[in-house]
Image (cartoon, rainbow, N blue to C red):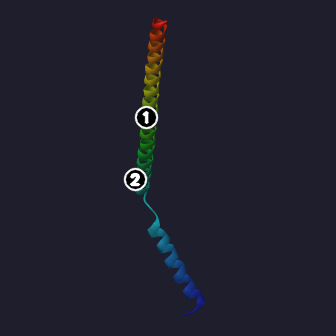
């Protein structure tokens, strides 16, 4: 075979392969919908994680406030007891 013929056959094969790899507009839309859904799901998971972290932080803050109030009440009671002894 001549080089020109070989080149023509190779070129034809490459063009045919390229044509096979093209997606239809419907396939492109489906891929885009899937990507959008995956991105939205990931964003929702991130938001849920953030909400859980915030809730944990708020719960910890509430526990600390409760402990501080308890300590303050105990200190005040001790001070009143000490004052009554004098």
Residue 5 pos. (x, y %): 55, 87
Left/right placement of residue 7 relative to residue 53 reads right
User: Is 75 placed above or below 9 here?
Assistant: above
User: What crowding class fits label 2: few (fewer than 14 Cα within 10 Å), some (14-19), or many (20 or more)?
Assistant: few
Between marks 1 and 2 in the image, the one whose residue lies nearer the viewer? 1
Q: Nearer the viewer, residue 48 or 82?
A: 82
In the rendered structure, find residue 76 and report the number of the disc placed on it: none
Q: Nearer the viewer, residue 70 or 50?
A: 70
Task: Specify the quadrant of the image occupied by residue 77.
Answer: top left
In the rendered structure, find residue 56 and report the number of the disc placed on it: 1
Q: Residue at x 43, y 34 (%)?
A: 56
User: Is 17 placed above or below 52 here?
Assistant: below
Of the residues under marks 1 and 2, which one precedes in the sequence? Answer: 2
Residue 17 pos. (x, y %): 47, 73
Q: Residue at x 41, y 39 (%)?
A: 48
Q: Residue at x 43, y 20 (%)?
A: 70
Residue 28 pos. (x, y %): 44, 55
């Amino acid at each position: 075979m001549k080089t020109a013929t070989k080149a023509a056959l190779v070129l034809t094969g490459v063009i045919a392969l390229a044509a096979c790899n093209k997606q239809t507009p419907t396939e492109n839309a489906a891929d885009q919908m899937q990507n959008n859904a995956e991105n939205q799901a990931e964003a929702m998971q991130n938001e849920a994680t953030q909400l859980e972290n915030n809730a944990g932080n708020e719960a910890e803050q509430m526990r600390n406030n409760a402990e501080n109030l308890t300590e303050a009440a105990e200190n005040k009671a001790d001070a009143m007891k000490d004052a009554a002894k004098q």
